[in-house]
Amino acid sequence: MRELSPSIIDLIKGDFVEDGDFTREIMTREYKFMLKNMPDDICVIVSYDDTGTPNGHLVAFKPYNRNYVMLEQAFSRCGKESAEYGFKLLEDWTKSKGFNEIRMETERQSVAARALLNWGFVEHSILMRKIL
């Protein structure tokens, strides 16, 4: 289900994938800020098990001045059916914003990269970096 309360972030932040200095704490602050101040620009979808514990989530947002949605966090311990439903909700939200593209960054050879191919993602570009 799509969540609108900033407090949901505290329940799912333990499964966020960090990227260097972009830590769980920073993500938590940013996502809570967006949910509180720009709820139409962020989509947080959470799946729950039978006990009401989150067992999967998607966090996506509309980047400023771009014509796509950026899927920034995707995590699942739920079954395929729940995961498919979550992606369908994200696709519907994306279309409701007038967009027809979802982007996501992941490591090239990761399990996540291979899994995303099953959800219809294709390699779009190469992100380069130089660590100083």
Image (tube, rainbow, N blue to C red):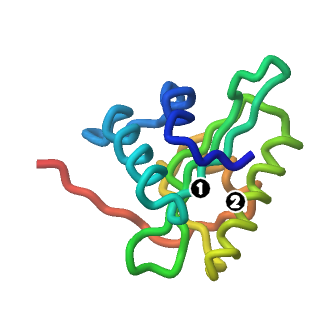
Considering the image in quadrants, where does the N terminus appear? Answer: top right
Residue 114: x and y, percent?
Answer: 65, 49
Q: Residue at x 25, y 39 (%)?
A: 21
Is 118 situated left or right of 101 in this image? right
Mark 1, secondary structure of its residue? strand
Side of 125 relative to 43 (left or right): left
The residue shown at (35%, 40%) is 29
Which callout, 1 or 2, points to the residue nearer the camera?
A: 1
Percent position (x, y) of residue 60?
55, 56
Q: Looking at the image, how many numbered discs can be counted on the residues?
A: 2
SS of the residue under disc 2: helix
Q: Residues within 10 Å of mark 2 (few under 14, many from 20)?
A: many
**In terms of depth relative to the viewer, which is nearer, 9 or 100?**
9
Mark 1 belongs to which amino acid?
A: Cys
Picture quadrant where residue 99 is located: bottom right
Earlier sequence position, callout 1 versus callout 2: 1
Mark 2, residue position:
90
Residue at image coords 26%, 57%: 129
Q: Which residue is mark 1?
A: 43
Label 1 environment density (alpha carbons within 10 Å; few <14, some 14–19, many ≥20):
many
Residue 115 on image: x %, y %: 69, 47
Question: CB of mark 1 within 8 Å of CB of mark 2?
Answer: yes
Q: Residue furthest top?
A: 51
Q: Position of residue 64 (x, y in %)?
A: 38, 73
Residue at the far left in the pictured view: 132
Tag 2: residue type? Leu
